Image: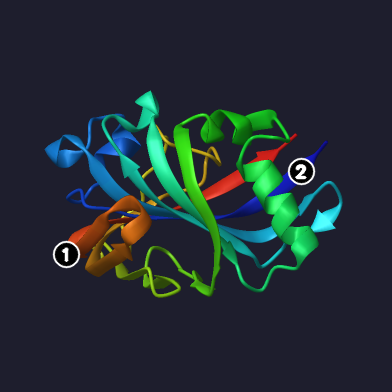
Amino acid sequence: MSYQLEGRLLEVCTCNSICPCFVGEDPDGGECGGTIAYRVDKGTINEINVSGLTLAMVAHIPGNVFNGNWRAVLFIDDQATEQQEEALLSAFTGKEGGPLADVAELVGEVVSVERATIESDIQEGTGLFKVGNVMRAEMESLKGASEKPVKLYDAAIDFSPGAPSFPGKAKTYHVSCPSLNMEIDLQAHNSMQAYFNFQT
């Protein structure tokens, strides 16, 4: 069992910017309705190439992100073959061990697994993030004094040490996920792009 995965972590949620999870704090309002995606720019799982594919989840997070007990719906990139889908699910649900198993433990219940067209090619925190007809967000990075994207280093959530995270605001964030009883329609709330490097 082995995997080597590099790519971009995307997150949009009901919290205000900057996301409290990234600094280890409780979510704004005590709970969170979030969408998280792992865009694999380059990677293999048990020698199966999964480069260019994305696994996303819409999740209800009932408290501090590290306390777990998330309820989630997983979405597999509809460009994945059956073999690639099985590999992605095996790794990201913790069956292949390693750091992804630690992340998977945060999810207390996977309500369903679905396929969707996922648009997730975010650059430095800015771009369109879309999961089928379930979720849509227009992400835009925060800008510093130089008008360049703000960068966050050494955050509590850091899956690629030394690489920056790009905090931002989602100009729009829409979710319609009946299986989680989740309906969201917000403007100017948290978005974040980070990087990941997972391997066993």
Q: Quadrant of residue 187?
A: bottom left
Q: Secondary structure at mark 2?
A: strand
Q: Residues within 10 Å of mark 1 (few under 14, many from 20)?
A: some
Mark 1: amino acid: Leu
User: Quick one: which residue is furthest to the right in this view?
Assistant: 47
Q: Residues within 10 Å of mark 2 (few under 14, many from 20)?
A: many
Task: Return the residue nearer the eye: 151 or 4.
Answer: 4
The quarter in which the N terminus is drawn is: top right
The vertical placement of 186 against 27, above or below, is below
User: Quick one: which residue is furthest to the left in this view?
Assistant: 29
Mark 2 / mark 1, whichever is N-terminal: 2
Location of residue 19 in the rendering, given as x and y in whole percent from the top left corner = 26, 45
Mark 2: amino acid: Tyr
Residue to which mark 2 is pinned:
3
In the picture provided, is 73 more to the left or to the right than 135?
right
Per the model, the C-alpha gap separating discs 2 and 1 is 36 Å
The vertical placement of 6 against 69, above or below, is below
Q: Residue at x 73, y 35 (%)?
A: 96
In the picture provided, is 142 more to the left or to the right than 97?
left
Q: How is the image coloured?
A: rainbow
Q: Quadrant of residue 171?
A: bottom left
Mark nearest the camera among 2 and 1 is 1
Task: Return the residue nearer the eye: 63 or 112.
Answer: 112
The vertical placement of 169 against 31, above or below, is below
Location of residue 159 in the rendering, given as x and y in whole percent from the top left corner = 53, 39
Q: Residue at x 70, y 30 (%)?
A: 97
Residue 186 marker: 1
Residue 62 seen in this snapshot = yes
Location of residue 144 in the rendering, given as x and y in whole percent from the top left corner = 24, 59
Q: Residue at x 83, y 56 (%)?
A: 48
